[in-house]
Image (cartoon, grey):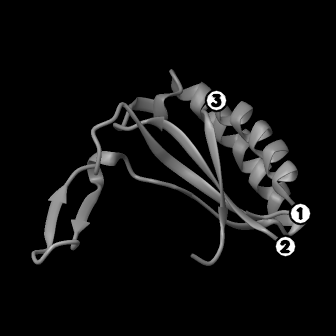
Amino acid sequence: MPRYAILVWGPSESRPHGGYGDEQTMRDTLAAIGAFNERLREAGSLVLVEGLAGAEASTVVDARGPDVLISDGPYVESKEGVNGLWVVDLADLDEALALATEASRLCDRPLEIRPVGRL
């Protein structure tokens, strides 16, 4: 069965209440996403679901040249970044698109789908 990463895009810097406005909206959104995750888990489709720390917590390693360069912060300055992800086993891209549509509505964020496999 094909595996897909569904990436959640949103504000790259940390924001109060996860950028959902107020605490109650954040709680309601997280509860809806939790129910969505449980449904995926029960269906046997969920491989991994995680939130990511803000881009300000990232470290970049660049070992393409003779020296290893390590720097704080995101690789690219951006107002948006990847905030979290699902990795799911699904039948095909159409199923991934349907799932991502539902998830995008739940978390009020744009999502990106990428096939996961051997490089």
Query: For residue 1, which numbered disc appears in the image?
Result: 2
Q: Which amino acid does label 1 sit on?
A: Ala
Q: What is the secondary structure assignment of the residue under circle 2?
A: loop
Q: Which residue is drawn at 89% across and 63% down?
A: 91
Q: What element carries label 1?
A: loop
Asked where in the image residue 110 lies, by quadrant, the reply is top right
Instruction: Assign a secondary structure to mark 3.
Output: loop
In the rendered view of the protein, which quadrant contains the N terminus? bottom right
- Of 82 and 29, which appears nearest the observer? 82
Viewer-nearest residue: 52 or 97: 97
Give the total number of marks visible in the rendering.
3
The quarter of the displayed image where residue 90 is located: bottom right
Query: Relative to 99, is 18 above or below?
Result: above
Nearer mark to the viewer, of 2 and 3 = 2
Instruction: Compute the Cα span from label 1 to label 3.
Output: 25 Å
In percent of width and height, residue 69 lies at 13, 67
Q: Which of 13 and 9 is in front in this view?
A: 9
First in sequence, mark 2 or 3: give its number: 2
The CA span between labels 2 and 3 is: 28 Å
Residue labelled with disc 3:
108
Q: What residue type is labelled 3?
A: Asp
Residue sitting at 59 percent across and 54 percent down? 85
User: Disc 1 or 3, which lies upstream in sequence?
Assistant: 1
Establish if 3 lies above or below 108.
below
Q: Which label belongs to residue 91? A: 1
Are the residues at dot 1 and dot 3 in contact (C-beta closer than 8 Å)? no
C-alpha span from label 1 to label 2: 6 Å
Asked if labels 2 and 1 touch by Cβ distance under 8 angstroms, the answer is: yes
Residue at (71, 44) in percent of width and height: 33
- CB atoms at circles 2 and 3 under 8 Å apart? no
Residue visible at 63% across and 40% down in the picture: 111
